[in-house]
Amino acid sequence: MNKTQPITLLVCALGGEGGGVLTEWLVDIARHAGYAAQSTSIPGVAQRTGATTYYIEVFPVPLAELGGRKPIFSLSPVPGALDAIISSELLETVRQIGNGMSAPQRTLVISSSSRTFTTAERMQPGDGRADATRLLDVIKSFSREHHVFDMGAAAREAGTIVSAVMLGAIAGSGLFPFPREAYETVVRGGDTSAPEKVSKMAAASLRGFAKAFDAVNGPREQAALVSRLMASTPEDTLPAHALPDSVANRFPPQLRGMLALGHARVLDYQDAAYADLYVERLQKVLEAERMSDPSAAGGFEVTHEMARWLALWMAFDDIVRVAELKSRRSRAERVRGEVKAGDDDIVKVYDHFKPGAPEFAALMPKPLARRITAWDRRRQSPWALPLQVGSHSVFGMASLRLLSSLRWLRKRGSRFAEEQALIERWLAAVVAGTRTDWALGHQIALCGRLIKGYGSTNERGKENLLHVIDHLAAAPLPDGSPAVRAQAIAAAREAALSDDAGKALDAALVRHGAPARPVKAQPIRWMKRPRAGAAAGARAGTTGV
């Protein structure tokens, strides 16, 4: 804040929306807080037909600190020299920007997304409305910071007029050096002896004020939090689970932040032995990277990426993991916070599950799992068990806790063995590629991004990864140089991530001399056509689905 120049605000409203009341409120707030302020106005033509503008200046230093001096204010706004514009109508906001009032590097713009159509818009035989998307683009391009929300809807919900909502938006923006209590005191009428006793009109204005304050202040606080996190050092963002010294000492300092996150995730997912396996796998990659890049010019990026994607793959989702996450105390506290439940409120949470035969087979030994999946394929439709579990009840929570306690069964299941075998294939490709060429190993490690989601999405990602490894990382290409193979893997990976159908991936594979993915057989299930009557039943046949 420049303490030698006034804070300038242009208020834009329509006739009858209380722009004059808003201006009086702001001047009263400033003077009661001990700041010098001045306002001028240009009234509209008539109620609800003309635009009304109000110009306000507030000197940011209290009068008590000026030593008897008084600031000199302007009577009219200067284009490009405004600190903020607030407007109750979207097109009116853009009109003021078109007049040059907003400076992209200086001006905060707060606008309502609601529209009051102009006479020219109404005269069109067809749809003459201005494109709201283009209007929003103008606001984004010509503002330092912008907040756009439906002020009219907020006013209607609160049972008040738009001026109260606009006041809350100004307070939430932090434009003026006044606390929230100063704004609310003026809205109440200045009576601070009994703040709980206010008129119905003032109570409605306070509700509108609060809605707008939250709509503007919430995103600002989130943005400030993100900025603080981005500016913090890696040591500030480490998880609560500290990395054991015996593990940390085996890795360079620049890897320990991601390593701590991955180690904590795998440990929470299974047990200490599984976390040790995670560390052993990363050590193989680190050894290969040190061999191909002795000077560490690449910053150990291969091991860093493997620490990320390996932890996510090793902690794959299954019914045990889902039950464990849904039965945690932190989840119940988060749900209560999201619905804003008080201490005396009762919150009922129903979790819907639909596990199928593959989910149950995943926890069975391989021979039994093979029989279950074969039985499921022979059915006309896949088997599933729809469940609705009230996790707020004793029985529901006990059921989730019982299922989550089957963590010991996970290691004995068929899926665990299959996932570990696939992980080892990927790990071996990364190690071999890194020893051959650092860039090649780095691109193979980044292919861990292909493993995501669950069900068919997860299976498709694993199939794509294995195909890339077999035909681009391991198999010889027409030009088998490591640099060409690394470029081919990068292109195939990005193609796979951009197209779920896989057409882009197949094209990228063929373009780089690798075969396209084989066509995967899909079962055709036959069923009888539903009967619509005796005659229709006689004509009923079969159809493929």
Image (cartoon, grey):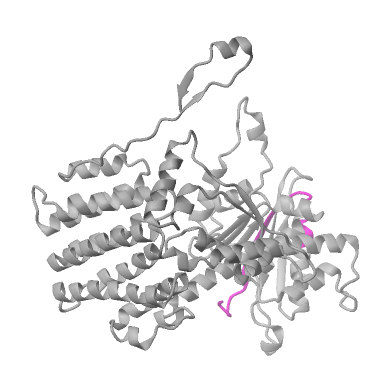
User: In the drawing, does residue 441 fall left or right of residue 45?
Assistant: left
Q: Residue at x 58, y 80 (%)?
A: 3
Q: Can residue 56 be seen in this view?
A: no
Q: Quadrant of residue 35?
A: bottom right
User: Does 21 appear above or below 505?
Assistant: below
**Location of residue 304 in the rendering, given as x and y in whole percent from the top left corner:** 30, 71
**In the displayed image of the protein, which residue is found farthest to the top?**
535
Please identify the quarter of the rendering in which residue 27 is found.
Answer: bottom right
384 within the magenta span: no
Image point (73%, 49%), residue name: 44
The residue shown at (66%, 44%) is 115
Q: Position of residue 75 (x, y in %)?
A: 67, 65
**On the rendered image, what quadrant is the N terminus found in?**
bottom right
Residue 491's x, y, as percent?
24, 51
The residue located at (59%, 65%) in the rendering is 402
Residue 10 included in the magenta stretch of the image: yes
Which span of residues is magenta-colored?
1-22
